[in-house]
Every structure is written in C-alpha cells, then in structure tokens.
Image (spheres, coloured by chain):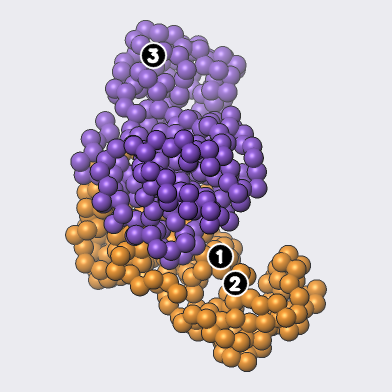
Chain colours: A purple, B orange
Amino acid sequence: MIRLFVAADLEAGAEIALPSDQAHYLANVMRQGVGATARLFNGRDGEWTARLTVVTKRVCALRVETRERTQDTGPDLDLIVALVKRPRLETIVEKAAELGARRVRLITTERTNADRAKVERLTAIATEAAEQTGRLDVPTVAGPDKLDRILRDWDGSRRLMFCDEAGDAAPVLTALEAVPPGPWAILIGPEGGFSPGERERIRATPGAVAVSLGPRILRADTAAIAAMTLWQASLGDWTAGASPAS
Amino acid sequence: MIRLFVAADLEAGAEIALPSDQAHYLANVMRQGVGATARLFNGRDGEWTARLTVVTKRVCALRVETRERTQDTGPDLDLIVALVKRPRLETIVEKAAELGARRVRLITTERTNADRAKVERLTAIATEAAEQTGRLDVPTVAGPDKLDRILRDWDGSRRLMFCDEAGDAAPVLTALEAVPPGPWAILIGPEGGFSPGERERIRATPGAVAVSLGPRILRADTAAIAAMTLWQASLGDWTAGASPAS
C-alpha cells in the first residue's frame, strides 16, 4: 500500500494536488494510473484513502474518500543527537521515524566536528520513513543547538535518558523500570563521547536518568537505535498496556 | 586504542607479521611507527598489548607483550537473517558484531530475491566492527541456507525468537521474561516478510518464541538491531546479573 504524507487538510471530497516529487513517484516509479488508490496522512487528520483523478508526467491529483484511521501521534519521545557523519546521521533520523520518536533535536558538543546539518534533507528522510513505517505523523527535525544551552534550559518534567559509556550507570531495563511514565528524551553523544565536564552537567540535569547499554562500545547510530527500542519496549507503545495500532 | 584481530596464536614474546591490509592500516592510515603499541586478539587467547618492531610500507610486525584481558566469548546468541539488499545486510552484520551475536546465519526464504551473499566481505565487516566494539571474538558469518532446511534440523534446546509482524504475539519484554536463560537465536525475515506457510512452520518449531516489535512496520535492519538489543538487555550481558567487561 502506498502511503504519502501531504501538507493539505484531509476531509472527504477534498482534491489534493501532489508536489512534483510525489507525483513523479506515483506516476513514474509506482506506475499508478487514474482510479488507483493511495493512503494520505498529514499529521493532523488521521489516514485517508484517496483515489487518483489526474495523472500526467508532472501532475497528480487525488480525491480524498474515506478515513481509515483516526489521528494518533504516538508517545512523547524526543531524540537528542550530536552531529555525526552524514550516513550515520541519516540512518539515525530514519530509525527515529521507524521507532516512533516525535522529535529529533540535533546538537553540537565539545567533541562534535560539525556545526551544521542539512535539516531539509533529514526531514525528507524522516518523511519517507514515516510513510513506510505506517505512523500518522512525521518526526520534526530541528537544530543544531549547543548541548549546554539545551541542558541549561531543560524542563525537569521531561526525563532525559543518558546513555553513559563511562561505567557506573544502571542496566537500562532496571533504570527504566523505576521511572513513572511521562515525556522523555534520549540523549546520544558524538563518536568520541561526551567530555567529562559535559557528562557531569548531563548527570546533574533535573530528570536525567543514566543508563548503561552493555559492555561493548556502540557506534552512535547503534546506541540511538538501541536506546529508542528499549524505551519503546519498556515505557512506550511496544508495552503490554499500550493501545494497539489500528 | 588500535585493536586488531589476528589469526596467529598469542603469547608473550610471539612475533606477529600482519597481512598487507592491516599493515597498510597501521603504517599508512594510522601512521604508527616502530615502538608504538596496539592490542591484538584472535578469539581464543584474550587480548594482548603488542609493540611494533618492523614498519615498512608493506610489512608490519609486532612483538606480543602482556595479556590485558582473558578470553570471553559472550552469550550464545545467533542471528538468522534473510538476504536483504546489500547496504542493509552489511549494516545488520556490523550491528550483530556490536551487539554481541556469536554467529550470523544467512537464509533464503520464499520472498527473498537473492540466493547468494559475499560472505568474505561480510566477515571483513564483522571483523572491523568487532575490533571497534571491544569484543574478544568475531562473529562467524555463514550461509545462505534455506529457511525450511534450518527449521527442519532445528535443535529445540536453542530458543528461536521470532519477530512476528502478523499480530497476536506477546510484547517482546513480556515474552522474554518468561523464558529461562540458555542458547538463543533471533530470526529476521526479508523485507516482504515471511509467507503464511513459513510463519506457521516457524511457530511450530520447537523452542520458537513469537514476539511483537510494536505497532509500526520496521525495516529488516531495524528489526534485527531492535531484537538483538532487547535480547541483550533482557537475557544477555546487558543485564544486572551479567559480569562486567574488564
């Protein structure tokens, strides 16, 4: 089933003209013709079946028909991640979308080697992953901001899961077990890790929960995926109590 | 710290000549000279400090000095994974090494589009990841074999974690909680999933444990990483009871 994220409002009878990249995808890559259906979502109005009414090489339009799922934005989970090399950063953003993070916040740290990121390109990756994974929203991608500024402004009602390589943190499932539900963020450092000073400031941040991700050294993308997975399985929508997806 | 996996036996005083790719890496990429140290491991004799005694453009030799860690092979976990497109398969093998799988077994299934894999190249990826992640062995990479043949020959004393997309499986942490420790394998299907017949045969295999990885559709690499992570955190060496790495 083809799923497309669109900007327009979705309601029965609405006509939606697709931007040229999506029109190209539908008409030329997936070879869909007039009368074919796709699913549309916009992060606000749920997921709708829509039928192709116009197909040319450059223009596609669909008429919105039936709502198939009501809107659901998933758990309130941010991923805060230091800028790493482009392929791994793109993997992290793709996986954040698949694993149900609501926001990706890029940061620079003392050991970060870059200070800018292609947020538009990362948003496109998040959008495509959201389309494929079946979620009803697209994680926002923002930043980069300085780690220290984020810590200084931290709202302690949001827990901060800190994957601490330096050693004495509790095993991750034990640490998460002890914490009530609520908004969370996961913090992932650069390939060289956080500096000792940063580590101290992170651990002193209200709401910070240090966890250990085992005895081996993990690359940043592996740590990000592992942390999001464990959070979803412990506290998020992979748990027994979570409502099933429709 | 530079870590290298070598084939030779390691004991104090042994002289080790490196193959040309490792010699190139040490001499030209890392620009190490005579007297510099590296760590060596071979999957049998623990991890040793060794000192460079010969460095030319094409030849490097080291003298083995002191054992720093005793051998430890990690938990008995196999990853059985269907052939997927090369970049994602390479990611899966890299992550299997980081996440402590002991073996990677490649399989073909009804919906697999390939029937061969570059096992030598995948082994090189596993080796490099093992060097970086700090483990003392390299996961073996073998296959591809047919899924049905593996299921037919299955030894029921090894549990088989089956990530079931089709719906009624238990949440993963609940399912793993109920099972005693012992040898395990994780089974990951191709991008199109298992066929209904395959799914039935997997669930009927002695030792099979069906688990759900949440409400979203995961790509094969995401599912593999998530499953290995959850296994390590629940039953492997990320748990409170596991012995810490030295």
Instruction: Identify the residue at image location x=39%, y=35%.
Output: A155
Apparent side of residue B79 relative to residue A113 in the rendered image (left or right): left
Residue A226 visible, this angle? no
Neighbourhood count class around disc 2 (C-alpha, 10 Å): few under 14, some 14–19, many 20 upward: many
Q: Which mark is residue B132?
A: 1
Whole-percent x, y for residue B226 in the image: 38, 51
* Residue closer to the observer: B220 or A205: A205
Q: Which mark is residue B3?
A: 2
Q: Amino acid at mark 2?
A: Arg
* Residue closer to the observer: A238 or B188: A238
Q: Nearer the viewer, mark 1 or mark 3?
A: 1
The residue wearing badge 3 is A10
The lab-note entry on whether marks 2 and 1 share a chain reads: yes
Q: Do the CB atoms of the residues marked 2 and 1 lie less than 8 Å apart? A: yes
Instruction: Identify the residue at image location x=27%, y=40%.
Output: A181
Apparent side of residue B201 relative to residue A90 in the rendered image (left or right): left
Q: Secondary structure at mark 3?
A: loop
Q: Amino acid at mark 3?
A: Leu
Apparent side of residue A128 relative to residue B240 in the rendered image (left or right): right
Q: Amino acid at mark 1?
A: Gln
Whole-percent x, y for residue B127 in the image: 56, 68
Dot 3: chain letter: A
Q: Secondary structure at mark 2?
A: strand
Q: Where is the C terminus of chain A found, in terms of image quarters?
A: top left
